[in-house]
Amino acid sequence: MKHLIDPTDLSIQEIAEIIAVAEDIIANREKYSNVCRGKKLATLFYEPSTRTRLSFTAAMMELGGNVLGFADAKSSSVSKGETVQDTVRVINCFADIIAMRHKVEGAPLAATEVSSTPIINAGDGSHSHPTQTMTDLLTIKRELGTLNNLTIGLVGDLKYGRTVHSLIKAMSRYENTKFILIAPPELALPDYIKHDVCDRYGIPYREVDNIESVIGEVDVLYMTRVQQERFTDLDEYERVKDCFVLDAAKMRGAKERMAVLHPLPRVNEIAIDVDSDPRAAYFRQVENGKFVRMALILKLLEWQNDSERKFDHGGSDLGCKCPNKLCISNLEPVRKRFESVDGIVRCVYCESQAE
């Protein structure tokens, strides 16, 4: 069975298929208005969401299907102590496909271990957000016409930004990708992404401390919000929250053909005077999210019984411990899963280096 937990669960060909279906949906919406009749999507959102949850809901409804689930874990049996895996076992009795958002890293992967229906990771803590990445890829393709030969500037919260981590993983597989990392030291990209993705696959990247010096080089400027909810030290949050702000004056130095993306919500990192710039793609990006999720639901249901579509994150109990207190392996009774890559042992659920 095929699940989507990480962008790398999809091959380049599978991503191309999903993007092609999304583009066909955009061009022929009526054609898809009843293709999921009788099918049910369960949205299990253990963490607040506006765009992602409503996007999944709208996607399934526009395919002619139905939606059930919860937007607040407190209104479910989770409040009574039910585990992720037990919840999924129950939901399997009612739904054909599941979209899960969870504040605990690795929770959607743990769900796949017991699920008889496809699981879509709608964001797990600060770890990964593959459907936002699919949204980003569709948006870049529609705005610039290609996913190859691009310089991508990533701005703001690169430490906790799961959308950034997922986008780097996905774009590292396309030709001649380059990254410019624009963040304060406190919010620098985690070493495991630099080592396991960029260094391992020879992807060029450099780190800078301002937007102005590099905005003329980038094809995509990916802005992010500094996420207060990910900080345990509020003083640290106050120090870095206003580090990078994009405004119309800075945009004057950008290429004539480029795109500004943002996973939203924004706070103050993009000034409203940028909204009218034709290169500001972030609200078009939101609608693209609905179309790509429609395509993803269709393809995962199609691939559900295809024995050639493999899903295996591997890993075994190597007698290690994950140091991440927000990893599912430290919070619920799931099997331990570790994997050694290039001599470094990491937790399969959250990718933290093992102790």
Image (tube, rainbow, N blue to C red):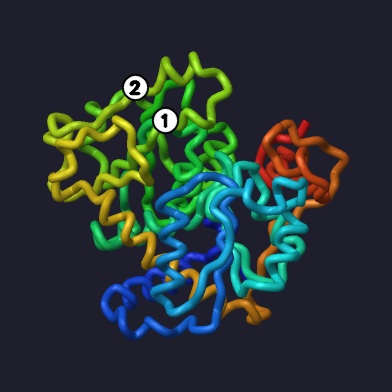
Task: Name the residue furthest right.
Answer: 319
> Residue 305 or 195: which is nearer the viewer?
305
* Residue in view at x 42 percent, y 40 percent: 204
Separation of residues labelled 2 and 1 (CA atoms)? 9 Å
Q: Quadrant of residue 47?
A: top right
**In the rendered image of this protein, does residue 31 appear above or below residue 339?**
below
* Residue in view at x 76 percent, y 51 percent: 83
Would you call the spot at circle 2 few (<14 residues within 10 Å), some (14-19), or many (20 or more)?
A: some
Residue, disc 1: 226
Task: Give amino acid for label 2.
Answer: Cys
First-in-chain label (2 vs 1): 1
* Residue in view at x 42 percent, y 50 percent: 50
> Residue 221 or 236: which is nearer the viewer?
236
User: Residue 243: which numbered mark, if any?
Assistant: 2
Q: Position of residue 318 (x, y in %)?
A: 85, 44
Relative horizontal placement of residue 20, taking residue 335 as reference (left or right): left
Q: Nearer the viewer, mark 2 or mark 1?
A: 1
Q: Quadrant of the C terminus?
A: top right
